[in-house]
Amino acid sequence: METENYNVIKPRKGVPIKAWVKGVPLEQEAEQQLKNVASMPFIYRHVAAMPDVHWGMGATIGSVIPTLGAIIPAAVGVDIGCGMMAVQTSLNAKSLPDNLKNMRVQIEKFVPHGRTHNGGRGDRGAWANIPDSQAEVWSEFKKGFDTIVEKHPKIGSRSPNHINHLGTLGTGNHFIEVCLDESDQVWIMLHSGSRGIGNRIGAYFIELAKQDMRKLIANLPDKNLAYFNEGTKYFDDYVFAVDWAQNFAKVNRHLMMQAVIKAIGNTQGIPEFQAEINSVNCHHNYVTREDHFGKNVLVTRKGAVRARKGDLGIIPGSMGAQSFIVRGLGNKDSFDSCSHGAGRAMSRTAAKKKFSIEDHIKATEGVECRKDKDVIDETPAAYKSIDAVMEAQKDLVEIVHTLRQVICVKG
């Protein structure tokens, strides 16, 4: 059955699934995960699947899960608060040098990236260039962190890198890009989250939920769908910790953006420029309370962006594809949501087996970026078509700006 711009999937048990997947592939494993989530007794009305939906841990990446009186830690995931930030600058294409390698090197110097370690250099990037305000910023987070650790000491054990991770990019699909819009205006765009401490909080509470449900977990369609009921021992602790990590992630992006602006300004030949730092900064891995269809519910967006009417959001393509600044249309059936990107078409392992360095070089022609074996899993062909994804969600968002990358820094 099809209605509106989405497909309706009706599992044998539970609520329906509304999936914005017309023209884009929906893998069988991802559809089964959606059905598993839809079967949970506390799902409100329906599950919404975005066009970039693909398999994840417990719940699909690219899904919107509204719940009443319960929360699934693995649906939020371990990259808590991961999201995007973008700013438009006063620079244009003519302001940029013909060879962009030096600008990429400057960004890599100013923003620690890759695997970063407590008190020293990472595999790539220099700790010496973390903004001086880092300790001051951490002081604003410390009280909340101490509250979390007081109840759950394991989260604070083994000296996690939470302080040093402020203002750092991380690994995997996290990135920094310099882009040009349809008028050749220069934008800066970046993607990261709550780093090591968010991972620690997420992994800890996912395991705690499994332990807390040890008598019931055998009845779940997937053990990673273990949940906390509202009013039980750990529910409020988890909500507090997640909210803290989401704020950490947002500030982390802000600090990185400040550093990137400095890096570009430090590049030889670049004129003085302005950048509106408080532009677009949005999560796409998070949980929050919202009103939908007359109820106040917990909404978990796992790889999805809030797109209320008028909300600005960011939908990036892959390393060699265009990205979009969008404005939400407030589609109620999607719980005011849209996709968070193109979505993976294959696993990282499969991409590494299928594509060569030569394939990657060809796919990223014209983009100043790393072109080595360590980024093969991020090559454009490992992702779905961003054009098909945008067409599938034309009733969720409208395009404000179309961006094309000229520099891409990967973690």
Image (tube, helix red, strand yellow):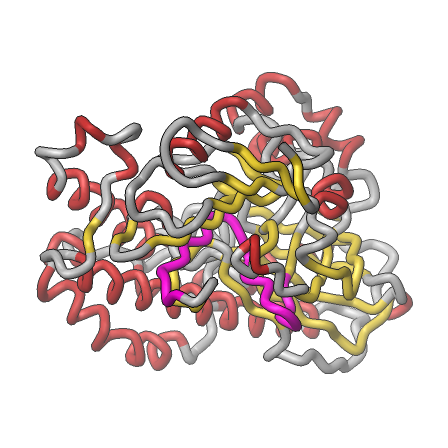
The residue depicted at 36 percent of the width and 62 percent of the height is 297
- The residue nearer to you, when weighing 350 against 29, is 29
Relative side of 47 to 207, left or right: right
The residue depicted at 37 percent of the width and 36 percent of the height is 14
Q: Quadrant of residue 230?
A: bottom left
Q: Quadrant of residue 313?
A: bottom right
Q: Is residue 39 visible?
A: yes
Q: Which residue is the extreme one toward the top?
A: 353
Q: Is residue 286 above or below residue 262?
A: above
Residue 264: percent from left, percent from top:
69, 69
Q: Is residue 151 above or below residue 217?
A: below
- The residue nearer to you, when weighing 268 against 45, is 45
Residue 132: percent from left, percent from top:
43, 78
Query: Which residues fall within the magenta stretch?
Result: 295-313
Residue 273: percent from left, percent from top:
76, 80
Q: Is residue 13 above or below residue 304?
A: above
